[in-house]
Amino acid sequence: MIVADVSRNSPNIFLELGFALAFRKPTMVMMSIDSEGKIPSNLAGYMIITYDPENLLALERKLYRFIQYQVERRSATYA
């Protein structure tokens, strides 16, 4: 599983995200609501989770649900 925060438009993050998407790894892309960067056009088709840095508990819940879904999905595949 990959969790990528694209809030800062870091080239390293985009490189790692590209590899994850190319290898079809379960990927959660997230971006802070106070980010000054824009979502790159090549990520427009992907779901991007927004989060408030002042409310990280809500982000924790989103991450938990994402991980839980991926674990259940993987378990069903190998059942």
Image (cartoon, rainbow, N blue to C red):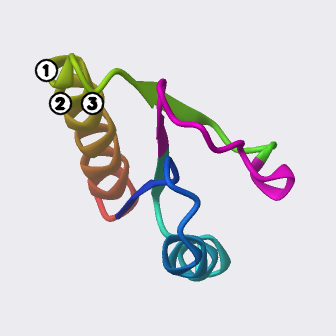
**Residue shown at 80%/43% (left/top)?**
44
Residue beneath the point at 23% across and 17% down: 58
Q: Which residue is mark 3?
A: 65
The percent coordinates of residue 3 (x first, y second) are 37, 56
Give the residue number, with chain letter if any, for mark 2.
Answer: 60
Dot 2 falls on a residue whose secondary structure is helix
Name the spot of residue 34 as percent of width and height, x first.
Answer: 47, 26
Does the segment drawn in magenta span residue 57?
no
Q: Residues within 10 Å of mark 1 (few under 14, many from 20)?
A: few
C-alpha separation, residue under disc 3 versus residue under disc 2: 9 Å
Q: Which of pointers 1 and 3 indicates the residue nearer the eye?
A: 1
Q: Which residue is nearer to you in this view: 8 or 23?
A: 8
Q: Residue 52 vs residue 10: left or right? A: left
Q: Earlier in the sequence, mark 3 or mark 2?
A: 2
Tell me, for residue 79, which label it has, or none.
none
Q: Residue at label 1?
A: 57
Magenta residues, start to end: 30-43
Task: Using a 10 Å C-alpha cutoff, classify the residue at mark 2 as few (fewer than 14 neighbours), some (14 to 19) or many (20 or more).
Answer: few
Q: Position of residue 1 (x, y in %)?
A: 35, 64
Secondary structure of residue under mark 1: helix
Outermost residue, right side? 41
Amino acid at pointer 1: Leu
Q: Mark 3 against mark 2, which lies toward the viewer?
A: 2
Is residue 23 shown above or below 62?
A: below
At a point 26% along the width and 55% down the height, the residue shown is 75
Q: What type is the residue that disc 2 sits on? A: Glu
Q: Is residue 62 above or below residue 38?
A: above
In the rendered structure, which amino acid carries the disc numbered 3? Answer: Arg
Callouts 2 and 1 close, C-beta under 8 Å = yes
Is residue 42 part of the magenta span, yes or no?
A: yes
- Figure check: 45 above or below 65: below
